[in-house]
């Protein structure tokens, strides 16, 4: 235990010095507080020391409380896994990140954290993915570990945490630890009295073990002395805010208050008198979560795989001059406080960055660190071979929607025996059937650790859905909680790195409800998780549903979300091309050199968003030429190429293809100078264009994006009319590429119920509105087009 105490004190110092250096030592040209959360780090340091240096094994994975990142970085620095220059540049450009990041930090981060609550939830979903992998023939050699979340008590206000509890119960969650830093202080105040008593009941209801770690070794020893029972009763009855205030004021005030409340009682008075002010303060601040010995013993007692919540009582700012102060969340020690604390910590001047400064037995400590199991295997970033992608053919239906085509493509994969198909994990938040995953699930079954037959099949009741649960199943059915969907996709999309076993996650959700899980989607992309998400049905073409079930802004989300390539195909053959490309794109891990044809960094790979619809469209004839296939992937191709005197281009994306094509046909009866641009991905078109502009700004004048080459043939007087079943800004930027006048059509207001035709006319995305708009463009021309 002596080595653990030494490590705890080294991590406490290094984490706080790193923050102090960032705020008070290194140059600060902005003049703005850098921050770093000293107090939130201090409350976690004993917990993290006991966890990492005593309890964990290499197969375990941890989501670190965001505000404890300095302790995590200090730990990696102590172990030689983080260079000093990264520590010195904490919260600076290229330095250790404010919050642990898989993609931006160089130390061994398991799960990125930062958006509070999400790092908590992903551990439970990751445990479910671990079980999914371990149940398969190709994953049976995986060493299963615990998925651990270090949780700030204020994070327990996040609603998605409770959604995860419910999902875990439904799926037999195991091998999950949540360790709550119960310092009872949040950013703006003190946690309400008795709150965790209610939270504890929730954990119990969902099958979790709850372990309260309230008293440290010093307190437990004092409780065993004569009068100790009265001291314990006083501690238990003391309000959170009062306890924090007394902690900040120190030993003399502790003594006065305890003597006022408990003095003249013989044994209790003697217990207090036997301790100096400093010893009394140490006793009163020795809560369970601030006692590395207690935490190590508590972790060691867990000998089962049931999900467990540890409620570790702590002092926010423990061991520092700002301990307990109500404002310490964003507060920093002053230079004077740091100088005095440095003397208290026994760190010689000019040795602030020395990992073992002030350590008496350096050799013994180094020997101990070399034997710590968790660090024995070094960095735990794994990889898995890329899976070959089988050729994907479009369904042969003469008329079909992209949503139906998506389901048929997956069904065809399910029929086969490709290695890629065996690694697909599908998931959906209670909309499996209505997003066309049903045929896939019927063939590949639902996942559960123990087989569960479908009662309807057993009783020979006809049903289109065969809900057989089995360990070999490849679909995880979720409840109606989109945050859980994206957390599961995020965890499964990291499987190759976390477990060395590649999983191909495919999720479906009603497109407007992508925004209900947007924080978790962004979180998954930030970690560089790899998955396909199909948002379907989309747009106002989901006509009978109306209102909130009709998406407007999701195409803009597709454009704006980093790490996500967004597509909105109109036809089944486009979708087939995109999905074949997407299955390979998910698996790429290149260095990021741009493709000089498009200036997109496709070799880095990423996730893919498919915006699909239930609106059936008549399909074009067979198209297999390279220009069509490549244009579909790059973001657009000419459905009707422009002539030398082209005066109007109709550029469409998605389900309005039939309206755009019909309008072009009506116009072409009177004019031949009209072109039709089929946009499959405004996202990739826009990304390539902006990347090419940046490249030209760097001096490469020959850099040209795909969209620039597409629009090169257009005369300057040509106008572009854009149309989409979504926000018109998705395509309105096309006019800026080469300075063409642009007339955007789309949907800007909440949806309505009605027929598809009714709504197309209401929102101005129908063929006649397009024709009328072209008429307005050509006023004064020799002929106008009659509808």
Image (spheres, rainbow, N blue to C red):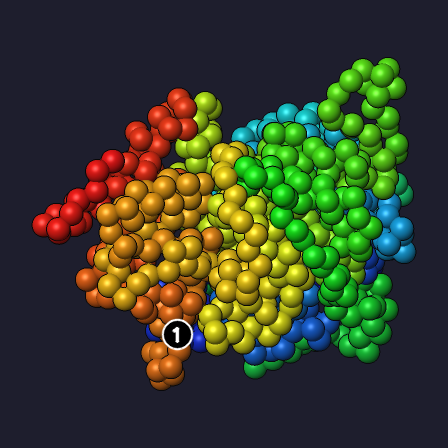
Image quadrant in which the C terminus is located:
top left
Q: Is residue 148 left or right of residue 31?
A: right
Residue 743 location (% of width, % of height): 24, 49
Q: Is residue 452 visible?
A: yes
For residue 306, what is the image quadrant? Answer: top right
Residue drawn at (83%, 72%) of the image: 370
Q: Is residue 494 left or right of residue 185?
A: right
Residue 237 location (% of width, % of height): 63, 29
Q: Nearer the viewer, residue 470 or 679?
A: 679
Q: Is residue 282 visible?
A: no
Residue drawn at (62%, 72%) of the image: 590
Residue 278 location (% of width, % of height): 63, 54
Vertical placement of residue 657 versus 91, above or below: above
Residue drawn at (88%, 32%) of the image: 451
Vertical placement of residue 362 versus 781, above or below: below
For residue 739, what is the image quadrant? Answer: bottom left
Residue tagged 1: 704
Q: Nearer the viewer, residue 409 or 737?
A: 409
Vertical placement of residue 367 versus 450, above or below: below
Furthest residue in direction bottom, as rendered: 699
Q: Residues within 10 Å of mark 1 (few under 14, many from 20)?
A: many
Residue drawn at (76%, 50%) of the image: 421
Image quadrant in which the N terminus is located:
bottom right
Q: Nearer the viewer, residue 430 or 125?
A: 430
């Amino acid at each position: 235990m002596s080595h653990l105490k030494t490590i705890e004190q080294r991590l406490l110092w290094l984490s706080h010095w790193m923050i102090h250096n960032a705020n008070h030592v290194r140059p600060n040209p902005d003049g703005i507080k850098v921050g770093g959360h000293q107090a939130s780090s201090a409350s976690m340091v004993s917990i993290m020391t006991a966890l990492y240096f005593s309890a964990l094994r290499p197969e375990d994975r941890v989501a670190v409380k965001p505000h404890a990142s300095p302790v995590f970085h200090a730990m990696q620095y102590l172990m030689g896994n983080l260079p000093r220059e990264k520590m010195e540049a904490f919260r600076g450009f290229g330095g250790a990140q404010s919050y642990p990041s898989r993609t931006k930090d160089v130390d061994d981060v398991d799960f990125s954290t930062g958006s509070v609550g999400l790092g908590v939830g992903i551990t439970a979903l990751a445990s479910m993915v671990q079980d999914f992998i371990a149940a398969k023939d190709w994953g049976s050699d995986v060493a299963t570990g615990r998925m651990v979340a270090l949780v700030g008590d204020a994070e327990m206000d996040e609603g998605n945490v409770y959604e995860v509890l419910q999902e875990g119960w439904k799926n037999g969650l195991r091998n999950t630890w949540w360790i709550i830093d119960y310092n009872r202080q949040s950013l703006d105040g003190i946690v309400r009295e008795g709150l965790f008593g209610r939270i504890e009941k929730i954990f119990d209801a969902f099958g979790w073990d709850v372990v309260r770690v309230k008293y440290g070794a010093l307190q437990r020893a004092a409780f065993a002395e004569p009068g100790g029972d009265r001291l314990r009763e006083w501690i238990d009855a003391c309000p959170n805010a009062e306890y924090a205030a007394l902690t900040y004021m120190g030993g003399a005030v502790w003594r006065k208050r305890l003597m006022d409340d408990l003095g003249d009682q013989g044994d209790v008075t003697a217990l207090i008198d036997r301790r100096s002010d400093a010893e009394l303060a140490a006793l009163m601040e020795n809560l369970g979560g601030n006692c590395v010995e207690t935490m190590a013993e508590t972790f060691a007692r867990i000998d089962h795989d049931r999900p467990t919540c540890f409620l570790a009582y702590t002092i926010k700012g423990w061991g520092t001059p700002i301990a307990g102060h109500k404002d310490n969340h964003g507060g920093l020690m002053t230079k004077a406080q740091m100088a005095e604390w440095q003397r208290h910590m026994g760190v010689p001047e000019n040795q602030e960055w020395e990992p073992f400064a002030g350590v008496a037995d350096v050799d013994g400590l180094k020997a101990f660190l070399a034997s710590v199991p968790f660090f024995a295997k070094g960095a735990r970033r794994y990889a898995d071979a890329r899976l070959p992608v089988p050729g994907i053919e479009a369904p042969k239906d003469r008329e079909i929607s992209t949503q139906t085509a998506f389901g048929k493509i997956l069904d065809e994969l399910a029929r086969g025996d490709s290695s890629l198909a065996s690694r697909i994990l599908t998931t959906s938040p209670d909309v499996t059937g209505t997003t066309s995953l049903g045929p896939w699930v019927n063939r590949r079954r639902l996942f559960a650790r123990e087989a569960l037959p479908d009662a309807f099949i057993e009783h020979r009741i006809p049903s289109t859905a065969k809900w057989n649960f089995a360990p070999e199943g490849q679909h995880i059915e979720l409840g109606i909680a989109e945050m859980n969907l994206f957390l599961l996709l995020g965890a499964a999309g990291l499987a190759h790195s976390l477990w060395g076993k590649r999983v191909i996650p495919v999720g479906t959700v009603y497109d407007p409800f992508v925004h209900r899980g947007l924080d978790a989607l962004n979180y998954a992309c930030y970690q560089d998780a790899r998955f396909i998400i199909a948002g379907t049905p989309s747009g106002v073409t989901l006509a009978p549903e109306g209102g909130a079930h009709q998406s407007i802004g999701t195409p803009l989300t597709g454009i704006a979300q980093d790490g996500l390539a967004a597509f909105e195909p109109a036809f089944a053959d486009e979708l087939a091309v995109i999905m074949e490309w997407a299955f390979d794109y998910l698996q790429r891990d290149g260095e990021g050199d741009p493709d000089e044809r498009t200036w997109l960094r496709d070799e880095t790979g990423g996730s893919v968003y498919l915006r699909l619809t239930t609106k059936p469209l008549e399909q074009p004839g067979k198209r297999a030429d390279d220009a069509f296939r490549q244009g579909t992937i790059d973001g657009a191709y000419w459905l009707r190429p422009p002539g030398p005197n082209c005066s109007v281009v109709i550029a469409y994306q998605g389900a309005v293809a039939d309206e755009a094509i019909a309008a072009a046909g009506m116009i072409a009866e009177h004019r031949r100078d009209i072109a039709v641009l089929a946009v499959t991905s405004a996202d990739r078109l826009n990304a390539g264009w902006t990347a090419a502009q940046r490249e030209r700004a760097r001096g490469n004048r020959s850099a040209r994006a795909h969209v620039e080459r597409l629009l090169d043939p257009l005369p300057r007087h040509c106008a572009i009319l854009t149309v989409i079943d979504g926000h018109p800004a998705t395509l309105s930027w096309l006019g800026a590429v080469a300075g063409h006048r642009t007339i955007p059509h789309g949907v800007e207001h909440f949806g309505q119920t009605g027929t598809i035709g009714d709504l197309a006319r209401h929102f101005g995305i129908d063929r006649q509105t397009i024709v009328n708009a072209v008429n307005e463009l050509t006023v004064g021309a020799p002929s106008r087009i009659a509808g």
